[in-house]
Amino acid sequence: MPVMNGEDAYKAIKHFCEESRVKLPPFIFCTGYIVSGFVTDVVGDGKYHACLKKPFSADDMINAIKKSLSYKQNLAL
């Protein structure tokens, strides 16, 4: 990313959400490198946030989005 990396973007958005008192949206990290400990900690069990290793397919992205949206809906029930 030209201005900041994904970890910095996550931290900035998380801070904004905390300050604004809104729920943090799900994140899908995409990387061609080794997944950092930070991303591993954020993603956790992968039910809300996800991490895709490049190269990934459109189906991989769609499945990650569906999984995250499904998890959010289950929390609302």
Image (cartoon, helix red, strand yellow):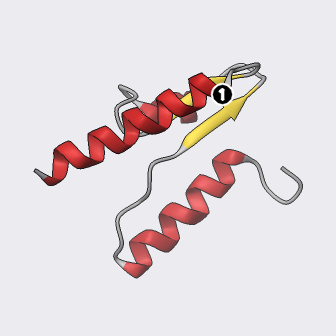
User: Does residue 14 lie above or below 61 as drawn?
Assistant: below
Left or right of residue 15: residue 59: right
Q: Tell me the residue at 66%/28% (across/down).
A: 58
User: Does residue 53 lie above or below 4 as drawn?
Assistant: above
Residue located beneath label 1 in the image = 58
Left or right of residue 48: residue 64: right
45 or 59, which is in the foreground? 59
Left or right of residue 34: residue 50: left
Q: What element carries label 1?
A: helix
* Residue positioned most to the bottom: 20
* Residue positioned most to the right: 2
Q: Tell me the residue at 28%/39% (across/down).
A: 71
Q: Tell me the residue at 79%/55% (across/down).
A: 4
How packed mark 1 is, by other alpha carbons closer than 10 Å (few <14, some 14-19, many 20 or more), is: few
Q: Would residue 36 be visible to someone looking at this image? A: no
Q: Position of residue 65 (x, y in %)?
A: 48, 38
- Name the image quarter holding residue 13: bottom right
Q: Tell me the residue at 38%/33% (across/down).
A: 67
- Name the image quarter holding residue 66: top left
60 or 46, which is in the foreground? 60
32 or 77, which is in the foreground? 77
User: Does residue 76 lie above or below 43 as drawn?
Assistant: below
Q: How many labels does the image show?
A: 1
Left or right of residue 38: residue 17: left
Q: Position of residue 73 (x, y in %)?
A: 24, 48
The amino acid type of the residue labelled 1 equals Ala
Q: Position of residue 53 (x, y in %)?
A: 67, 21
Q: Would residue 11 be visible to someone looking at this image? A: yes
